[in-house]
Amino acid sequence: MSDTGDDSLTAEERAAKEKVEKQKEEEEQAALPYKWQQQLGDVDITIPVPKGTRARDLKVVIAKKKLSVVLKGHEPIMEGELCKEIKIEDSTWTLEDQEKVFIRLEKINNMTWWENVLTHHPKIDTKKIVPENSKLSDLDGETRGMVEKMMYDNQRKQMGLPTSDEQKKMDTLKQFERAHSELDFSNAKIS
């Protein structure tokens, strides 16, 4: 039994519970003074400001673990500790149409979802995030290589052939056999 107690619920009860949790999350997020969305690599924040606001009327501070947006002469619109660290040099803000501040925060760890922007704000359930489909060309070289290898290995398994790692081990064993023909390798197993 899980610690959430969901195992004892019927499908209808679980669906009703999830609907209530989703509605609560949506209400909490709607009450924030900003809207936000994220991809694995970045977080985008949109903050409405009074029409006619100019950039010089704003004080926006983006730090590795802190964010502050203040309209001069007013209380901070948002201010506090970020839930995760960001790349300061790749994070930016702009004022759009003199009525909204757009902030893009580049994540340091681009393999995790954020539960919230500022640690003292309500959290979202990151297990329910459905990422957009991405193209292989969108990935960095190392990640793309890993994905291509996984796809290749999966295809080989479906055809009943060894994966690239298994093939590498078999090739190494064959080389060793040729170099040491005096040894019996008939019972050799590769793990």
Image (spheres, rainbow, N blue to C red):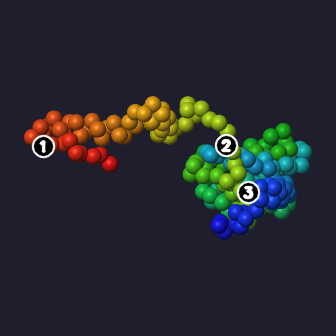
Find the residue positioned furthest to the left: 182
- Which quadrant of the view contains residue 176? top left
Q: Earlier in the sequence, mark 3 or mark 1?
A: 3
Q: Residue at x 60, y 57 (%)?
A: 85
> Of 159 and 70, which appears nearest the observer?
159
Q: Residue at x 73, y 47 (%)?
A: 37
Image x and y of residue 129, in percent: 69, 49
Q: Is residue 91 visible?
A: no
On screen, residue 63 versus residue 19, left or right, reads left
The answer to whether marks 1 and 2 mark residues whose Cβ atoms lie closer than 8 Å is no
Q: Is residue 100 visible?
A: yes
Q: Callout 1: 10 Å neighbours few (<14), some, many (20+)?
A: few
The residue indicated by pointer 2 is 131
Q: Mark 2 to mark 3: distance in Å? A: 15 Å
Q: Earlier in the sequence, mark 1 or mark 2?
A: 2
Rendered image: mark on residue 74: none
Three-letter amino acid code of the residue under disc 3? Ile
The residue indicated by pointer 3 is 124
Image x and y of residue 14, in percent: 77, 58
